[in-house]
Amino acid sequence: MSLFWRIFALNALVLGSATALLLWAPVTVSVPVVLTEAVILVGGLAVMLVANAALLRIGLAPVARLKKLMTTVDLLRPGRRLPERGRGEISELIRTFNAMLERLEHERAASSARVLIAQEAERRRIAQELHDEVGQTMTAILLSLKRSSDEAAEPLRGELQQAQEITRASLDEVRRLVRRLRPGVLEDLGLVSALTSLTSEFSTHTGLRVLRAFDTGLPPLDQQTELVLYRVAQEALTNAARHAEAGRVEVSLRHTGGTVVLAVTDDGHGCGVAREGAGIRGMRERALLIGATLDITSASSGTQIRLTVPDPRKQS
């Protein structure tokens, strides 16, 4: 039944019921209308309007559900659909919207994949240039300062040695940036070694206490999945240091059933679900890239970021 005929039928039902009551009820209308008759007529009108509103709300409930989904849908949280029932206009509208949502989710996932792949390529290029150009130049400056300080007399020697220490610290910072941009440990030694190196460097750099719990015997993961796991852990640790005001962070990587689960839990004040910024949105996009699920639990006692990756052996 179309929406027009559905509304017409509901109104006809209410008006027909009211007409039947008027025909069969022992009620007459005087001229002029007396108070009791007016009360009966107004009461009947009120009952008719309430019944009409209730029936219309029931009949248009699928439209209300569709409107709610339209206003709350998020392409980074795929899978939300409305049930399709019947063959009327509303059911056809719901089917069309579900199909459009499916297409948009696929297009968003494909575009996000292209953007992230280009981003990683750009990170590798910048890291290579920092290592080859800036790193080598600063190393040459460091050696030149050392030769000059060895030959100089005081107090110039002390000033040259101070400049040497500043240059060495800057060179270490450049190398740290290179490792963040291009995790060579991940490519050379694997995910567990890369996460161990990441957490150790994070603890040294921020002063936070980091606990690690990595399962042995993890299933083999492709390079893209390992990179997503590494980047999500990296961003979660950065959020814990910048926003959570935490004193302790626990990073775990476990093989549970048919999934690989990465969890980063801090004991900070929590970030709140409504405060998702670009970092968390980026993690959700990376999760979509490999078909994983990202769950964020935030409370006053801390925040947990949990990435669940399907076991590739179960999918093949």
Image (cartoon, helix red, strand yellow):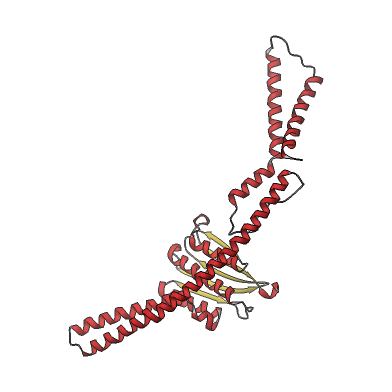
Q: In the orientation shown, which residue stands out farthest toward the left? A: 154
Q: Position of residue 60 (x, y in %)?
A: 69, 40
Q: Position of residue 213 (x, y in %)?
A: 55, 75
Q: In the orientation shown, which residue stands out farthest toward the right? A: 24
The N terminus lies in quadrant: top right
| Numbered label tally | 0
Q: Is residue 218 left or right of residue 189?
A: right
Q: In the orientation shown, which residue stands out farthest toward the top? A: 31
The C terminus lies in quadrant: bottom right
Tell which of 121 and 46 is nearer to you.
121
Q: Position of residue 99 (x, y in %)?
A: 68, 54
Asked which quadrant contains residue 112, the reply is bottom right
Asked which quadrant contains residue 63, the reply is top right
Asked which quadrant contains residue 24, the reply is top right
Tell me the residue at 69%/44% (across/down).
Answer: 62
Q: Is residue 260 left or right of residue 154?
A: right
Eyeballing the image, is 19 above or below 272?
A: above
Tell me the residue at 62%/57% (across/down).
Answer: 104
